[in-house]
Image (cartoon, grey):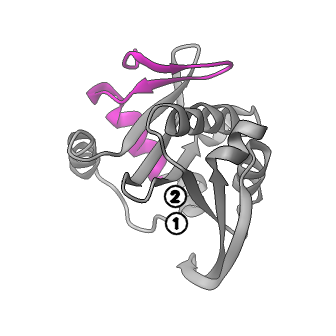
Amino acid sequence: MPGPVFLDGEPVRLRTIEEEDIEFLQRHINDPAVRTPIGSSAPVNEAEERDWFESLNEGDDVSLLICVDDEAVGTISLMRIDEGWGRGTLGYWIAPDEWGEGYATAATRLLVGHAFDQLRLHKVRAEAFDYNAGSRRVLEKVGFTEEGVGREECFVDGEYVDVHRYGLLEDEWRDL
């Protein structure tokens, strides 16, 4: 059973990440269908995943398990939070068997709302590779604006790819 509910919505609930979630996280972060869209190229063993889990409480990042009916379907994080500048960076992934259900969109709405309502951020940023049309659609559905493209910025699976940069300002979020 995942940890306690931190943010409650429909159809997803965002729960704390617990030790018993390590196997789910490690299995999916090594799946090419997950690691390629997020730009991960190194294998992650159980010890490394456990180290990441144990680092969750060390900084200001907010990392949560995306759950549907108490089953984990992915993760979402607000990272590199800079209170002085009022910004943070969003990242997420969904298990491939759960793609197309709207879970990433629902989870993004919940965490962005938390960023503006509770953390008092002014801007949430996100990036998506050119070939990751699904992630770009999620960001645009939630209200993010494409702010630019880093041309051939990252080397993924043997080729340089463009990175699309997105931003969402608090007042834009409130006007949705």
- Above or below residue 3? Residue 131 is below
Residue carrying label 1:
39
Report the magenta residues as a range. 1-30
| Residue type indicated by callout 1 | Gly
Would residue 159 be visible to someone looking at this image? no
Dot label at residue 157: none
Is residue 129 part of the magenta span, yes or no? no
Of 115 and 6, the residue lying toward us: 115
Image quarter where the C terminus lies is: top right
Residue appearing at x 33%, y 36% in the figure: 22
Residue at 44%, 23% in the rendered image: 15
In the image, 161: left or right of 25? right
Q: Secondary structure at mark 1?
A: loop
Camera-side residue: 31 or 15? 15
Q: Is residue 24 magenta?
A: yes
Mark 2 residue type:
Arg
The structure residue drawn at horizontal position 62% and vertical position 39%, both measured from the top left corner, is 108
